[in-house]
Image (tube, helix red, strand yellow):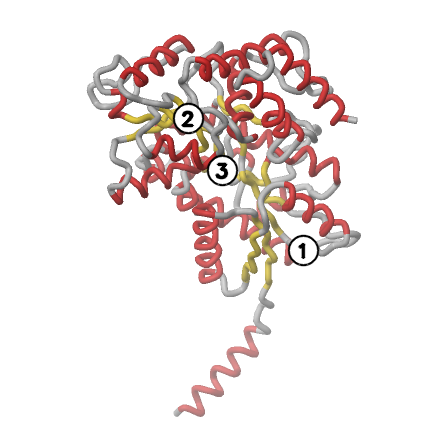
Amino acid sequence: MKTRHFLAASVAALVAGPAMAQQTVTWWDFLAGGDGVRMKALIEEFNEEHPDIQIEGTTLEWGVPFYTKVRTAAAVGQGPDVMTYHLSRLPLGLEEGVLTPITAEDMEAAGLSEGDFFESSLNAAKGPDGTLYAVPFDIHSIVLYYNKSLLEGTDFLDDNGELTGIESLEDFEAALAAVQENGSSAPVSYATGDDGGVYRVFYTLLQQQGGELISEDGEVLPGDSVEKAETAIATMTKWFEEGWQPEQALYEASVALFTSGKSGFHMNGVWEVPTMIDLAESGELGFEWGAVEVPQLMDEQTTWADSHAFAIPVQGDGEMDAEKREAVMTVIGWMNEHSLDWAGAGHIPAYKPVAESAEFQEMEPNATYSSLADNASYDPRSEIAGVASPAYDAAVNIIAPAIHGYMSPEEAVEQIKGELSRAMN
C-alpha cells in the first residue's frame, strides 16, 4: 500500500513539473526600538506565509550611516533588493542615482495602485517628472501630547476629558500659562537641544504661515519667508523666555519631562505613542493623556511630516531579474496590506484601505490625529533637506542657540540662509 502511494506521489510530482525556485529577498532597514520589534515580527509573519519567498533582514544604523552605506553598496551592486527609505531623503537619492523607478507593472505585481495612497505621501515618493521611486508605508508626524491632570479646571479640557479651545497661537500660549499655574514646571516639552525636535517645531510654524524653507528652484527662504522664519524662531524664543519650554533638552529628557508629569504638553513624533501606552498600562504614567494633531497656531492647518517607504536600489551596472523583482513587489504589497500592525507604533498607514478601515478607526489615539495625513507638510524637495541633512544641522547649530537667547531671530535667519545656500554648492 505504501509503495503504491509513493509511486502515485512521484508520478503526480512529475506531471506538475519542477517546484518553483525559492526567492531570497535581501532587506535593509534602519528601524530600532519599538519600530524594529514590529518590523521584525512582520518579516517573520511574511516568511511563514510565503515558503517560496524568504526575507533576509538586516538593520543598519539610522541616519547618515544608513544612506552612506546604501550609496556605496548600490554603486557596486552589493546593496539590498529592497530597503526602507525616508521620503524626505528621496531628492538626495535621486541626485546620487541610487533609486530605481517603480513602474505600473511593479505596482500591479504588488497588488497596489497609486490611488491606494494618501496624495501627500504619494507626491513625496515621486521625482520632479512624476516618476514613482518608492512605495509609501506610513505617514509619521509630530503631534501634541497633553496631560489631562494638568489641564483640569482650565478652559482647555471638555466634559469628556478631551483637549479643546486651542485654535490660535494666543489660545495655545494661554493654555501653557494655565498648566504652568497648575504646577507644570515645563508647560511644553520638546527636544530643544536636538536637531530633530527643533527642526520639526520650527518647520511646522514656518509652514503654518505659508513659508518656504527652500523653493523648487533652490532658493533658501525666498521672498517673505525670511520674515516668517523670524516669526517662527521668535515664537519658540518666547516660549523659552516665559519659562514654558525646557532649556537645551535632549530627546530623552524632553520625553521624561512629559512622562514624569512635569509637562502639560509635549511635541514629539507619533512614534512615542507606544511609550505612553506601555507606561499607562503598567501604572507608571500617573496621569491620563491624549494626543491630537498639532493645532492651527498660525495661518494654515499643517504639520511637519515624513514617511517610511520601500525603495529598490540600483544593482550596480546590472539589473534585478524579473522573478526577483516580482518577489520584492510581493513583499512591498504584503507589508502595506498588513500595515495595521505597523500602526501600533503610532504611525498612520499610508495605504488608505487600512487607514480607512474600521480596525484603524478604533485605534486610539491614532484615529484622533489621523486627519494630519491630509494636512502633512513634507520637507522641501531638496538634496540638503530631510532627516540627517544640512537643514537638520542648521536647526541644532543655529536655531537652537537662537531660541535660548544667544542670537536674535534676525541673526539666526541670516545664518540659515548663508549655511544652506553654501550647502547647495
Check the picture and name the quadrant holding the N terminus. Answer: bottom left
The amino acid beneath tag 2 is: Ser
For the residues labelled 3 and 1, say whether their Cβ atoms are less than 8 Å apart: no
Q: Is residue 51 above or below residue 81?
A: below
**Can you identify the residue that label 2 sits on?**
189
Residue at the extreme front? 406
- List x then y, in percent, for residue 45: 44, 57
Q: From the image, tell me which residue sits under label 3.
A: 138
Instruction: Determine crowd level at label 2: few under 14, some 14-19, many 20+ residues with C-alpha closer than 10 A.
Output: many
Q: Secondary structure at mark 3?
A: strand
Total of numbered circles in the picture?
A: 3
Q: Amino acid at mark 3?
A: Asp
Going by the numbered disc 1, the residue's amino acid type is: Ala
Q: Please state which of residues 371 and 180 is positioned toward the viewer in this rendering.
A: 180
Marks 3 and 1: which is nearer the front?
3
Q: Residues within 10 Å of mark 3 (few under 14, many from 20)?
A: many
Label 2–label 1 contact, CB within 8 A: no
Judged from the image, the secondary structure of the residue bearing numbered disc 1 is: helix
Instruction: Find residue 161 and report its image quarter.
Output: top left
Looking at the image, which residue is at 24% across and 25% down?
149
Residue 322: give its label. Answer: 1
Secondary element under disc 2, as helix, strand or loop, is: strand
In the image, is residue 116 above or below residue 198? Answer: below
| Nearest to N terminus: mark 3 or mark 1 | 3
Residue at 70% x, 31% y: name it.
383
